[in-house]
Amino acid sequence: MRSVLVHVDGGARSAVRMRVAARLAHEEGLQLTALFAAAPPLVDAPFGYSAGGMATPLLESVYRRWRDAAFDAAESVSRTVPVAWADLGPEAPVAGFVRQALHADLLVLGQHDPGEPQHAVPAGFVPAVLLASGRPGLVLPRAGPVGTVGRRVLVAWNRSPPALRALSAALPLLRHAEHVAIEEWAAHDDAADADARESLDAYLGAHGVTAAYRRHAAGRRPVGERLLARAGELEADLLVMGCYGRPRSLEWMLGGATRTVLGRMALPVLMCH
Amino acid sequence: MKSLLVHLEGGPRCAARLALAEQLASRLQGRILALFAAGPPLFALAGMSGDEAGSAQLLHEVHAGWRSEAVHAFEATGRDVPTAWAEVGIAESPVAGMVAQAMYADLVVLGQHDPDDADPRVPADFVTDVLLDSGRPALVLPHAGRHGRAGRRVLVAWKPNAPSARALSAALPLLRDAERVTVVEWGTRPPACRGAALDLELYLRLHGVQATLEREERDPGDVGERLLSRAADLDADLLVMGCYGHSRAREWVLGGATRTVLRSMTLPVLLCH
């Protein structure tokens, strides 16, 4: 991992994302870039389209205000590590961010906050970026302080390629962790389980990681909720999991656990598709 | 790239595949897991009468014969790198067995399907299925010709999407000490991003790779043919590209370039879906 790309959008959480990213960049010696990506708030403007020419300066001023706030957030960590600044300009934020993300090793994004009055990016920004870029993203919760990230880790495992990619991306963090739990929620058969368990142990061992494994029986409660509850029980400061979705016309159709976690997470989540 | 999973089916191509894998593992300070996986030898039943016990016996004998060829090839490898042996039983699907192991491998090494093979040991879609079901990076060796080395002169085909990014990431350990790396970007130059935009050149530089970047703007028709032709011009010994396909009715449908390359490859190809 050599580079981290942070999404800044002028909202209050941009500064939190920058602080977490800067700490990581400093610890791991990563190149840090802040990328301002926001869509001019056409829908939220008080006059909308009806004001014709009047709306434009208003939109521009909102946009500039966001950009200035984003820049301040980026600059606020520049004493810790050098920060490179990039600005997508008027380009559609998802497509533009994905294009840049393809050249970064880790993304830092913010959970969508439906309570915010103005949204710089669409509600589906985070999953769309993760799914289209295939890059690992550290998603920070929309509220609350973010202290340590990666001291007590829960890896949600399901033997799929996205889960493996997320685990793989998390390895640099897991090596410094005090406690790593790797847990599955599904019915399995014992013979196959023993093999899979052995392979997983060998993989982790080869990468210098010790983890405590546990399997939970498949239940009726949605897996996403169970993951978050378990993270709470373990007092985890990082959840690692695969990100699931498939393209469907203009949007992505998300897997249930992915959607639940992105909606309700209260801790940082490292996801990868 | 610590663990290489090498597919063995017995037969004449295993020795060369193991030799190349060993060379790469040695260069990358990794280790090898050889996995014997071969399908039920249905061709042994051609022309037999309906004697079930006899057919089953024959199946086991033929399969055992294949297995001992694979063991022989495995035992003949040098001991430069740590090696281990595993196998998929006669009753299991070779694809499923391979995919299960591939989950934990950093690179899977496979042999290109040979449609004229008089003694096929795995289904025709074996390589495609393993690539797409596992989502892991795989090095596929051509069935024809001798390919004793891979990764000295590398051609990377780049498109701005997730499979391409995964293939490039997977190949980085090889690219770092290659003699020459050429990256061909397809499609028109994307819109510029203001400020410190992330791009391929920066990505490669951060990862310690020196490369020549080229761009092909026009769509040449068959991209696959164009890639193989460019590889020949450059006297490349490794092609790196994304693997494209989507599932339809429980089968994989490959993208055009991927299909062409898997069918007509003249050099080892590293692909990732």
Image (spheres, coloured by chain):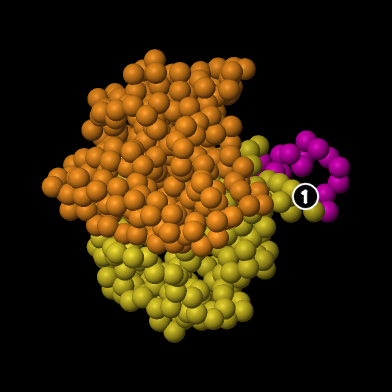
Chain colours: A orange, B yellow
Direction from residue B69 to residue A143 in the image, left or right: left
- Is A71 colored magenta in this rendering? no
- At 24% from the left and 40% from the top, the residue drawn is A19
From where the camera sits, is residue A5 visible?
Answer: no
Direction from residue A125 to residue A101 in the image, left or right: left
> Please, which chain is the residue tagged with disc 1 on?
B
Instruction: For mark 1, give the secondary structure.
Output: helix
Q: Position of residue B243 (x, y in %)?
A: 54, 60
Q: Position of residue B126 (x, y in %)?
A: 61, 53
- Is B50 colored magenta in this rendering? yes
Q: Position of residue B110 (x, y in %)?
A: 51, 57
Q: Please rate how many residues cluster around mark 1, counting C-alpha atoms within 10 Å: few if below 14, some from 14 to 19, many from 20.
A: some
Q: Nearer the viewer, residue B88 or B161?
A: B161
Q: Position of residue A14 (x, y in %)?
A: 32, 42
- At 49% from the left and 59% from the top, the residue drawn is A54
The picture quadrant where one finds residue A90 is bottom left
Total marks in image: 1
The residue pinned by badge 1 equals: B45
Residues drawn in magenta: B47-64
- At 22% from the left and 53% from the top, the residue drawn is A83
